[in-house]
Structures are given as structure tokens and as C-alpha cells.
Image: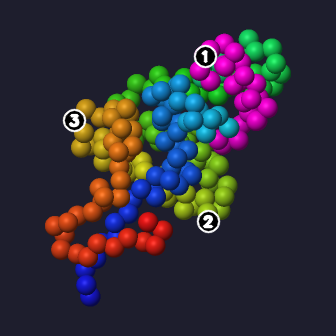
Amino acid sequence: NIPYQIVRGVEFYNRKEIRDLLAYLKVLVNPADEGAMLRIINTPRRGIGKTTIDRLRAYADSAGISLYEALRKGEEIGSLGKAPKSKIAAFVDMVESFRKDPTDSVASLAERVYRESGLAEALQTLGSEGQNAIENVDELINGMARYDRQAEEPSLVDYLQQIALFSDADTYEPDRGAVALMTLHA
């Protein structure tokens, strides 16, 4: 009957479904974030495969522009076929519609991205494993809603900066009067 607290938290942000949604949000803030862009360009699957991505990256490198700028110029890239060009255009239109979202609420923007990007539908098709992932995304969005309520001027940039600095130590409450434990994985 010894009170305890498990000090953990960062692993939550390392889950695939969380990283996917956060990558979308990072691209909205910084379209030149190539790592985030590469993560979401075909997540969930939308028919933009490795060959297309390689051609886009080659074009971006040769033109000295970001991958996102290459995506926006997809129609001009001669090495791409008609089908990939239309899929790229649809992807860019989706990202641009998210970027132009007028809401000040991080949670409502994240909810919209989650639904309209196809992430929600993709997770629903995974059965019980998908249900756990859906619950994780719901918890992330609930955390964003708490941020929206508590922040003086909530913004997506500020939220992303806060979670980037988050560590296991942030969950530790030394005044709680409990033994601090961590899991074997931590």
C-alpha cells in the first residue's frame, strides 16, 4: 500500500498515430519540414509511391526548392505521369485547405486534419489495434483542448514548441508524497 507514480509520458508521443497527426500539424506550420512531409505524403495511403516521391525530391534538389514547393509545381514535372500529378494536386489542395483554416483552436484544427486527411478512417479499418490508436488520438486532441483553454493566446506554433520540449521529467510531481517509478522500457 505504498503510494507511487509512474514517471513516463514521452512514449505517448512516439506512437505512430500520434507522430502521424503531429507531422500533419508540423507541415501546416512549416511546409519546408521535409521529414514531416515525407511522413504524411502517403499517410494514409493515397497512391503517391516511392518512385513518385523520388522524382519529386530529385526535381526539388535540381531546382533548389523545398519538397513542398516541388509538390505545388507537380504539373510542371515532366517525369511524373498524369495519375501521380492528380494525386499530388489533391494532396496539396488538402494541405492548403488546412493551412488556411481560420480557427484559433488547436484542438479543432487537429480534429479536422485527423478526419479529412483520412487518418481516422484508416485507423477504423484496423479493428481492435485501430481502436487503441483512435483512443490515443482522442487523448492527444483532448490534451490540445486543455491547452486551448489554458493558453493566453493559443496557437499551433506554441503548442508544437511546448510538446517538443516535453520530457518524462515533466510528469514527475515531487510534492505528491509517492515513490517515483519508471517502466522497464523507460
* Mark 3 residue element: loop
Badge number at residue 152: 3
Query: What amino acid is labelled 1 in the image?
Result: Ile
**Magenta span: chief secondary structure:** helix
Residue 20 vs 95, above or below: the answer is below
Q: Nearer the viewer, mark 2 or mark 1?
A: 1
Query: What amino acid is labelled 2 in the image?
Result: Ser
Q: Nearer the viewer, mark 1 or mark 3?
A: 1
Asked whether disc 2 touches disc 1, contact meaning CB atoms under 8 Å apart, the reply is: no
Quadrant of the image containing the C terminus: bottom left
Mark nearer the N terminus (2 vs 1) = 1
Q: How far is the residue under mark 2 from the one under mark 3?
A: 38 Å
Magenta stretch bounds? 43-67
- Give me the residue at 64% from left, 28% from top: 91
* Mark 2 residue element: helix
What percent of the width, then of the height, locates residue 105? 36, 35
- Give me the residue at 48% from left, 34% from top: 26
Q: Say which residue label 2 marks.
A: 128
Colouring scheme, one of rainbow, by chain, secondary structure, one colour: rainbow
Residue 111 vs 178, above or below: the answer is above
- Give me the residue at 44% from left, 35% from top: 109
Q: How far is the residue under mark 2 from the one under mark 1?
A: 42 Å
Q: Say which residue label 1 marks.
A: 65
Mark nearer the N terminus (2 vs 3) = 2
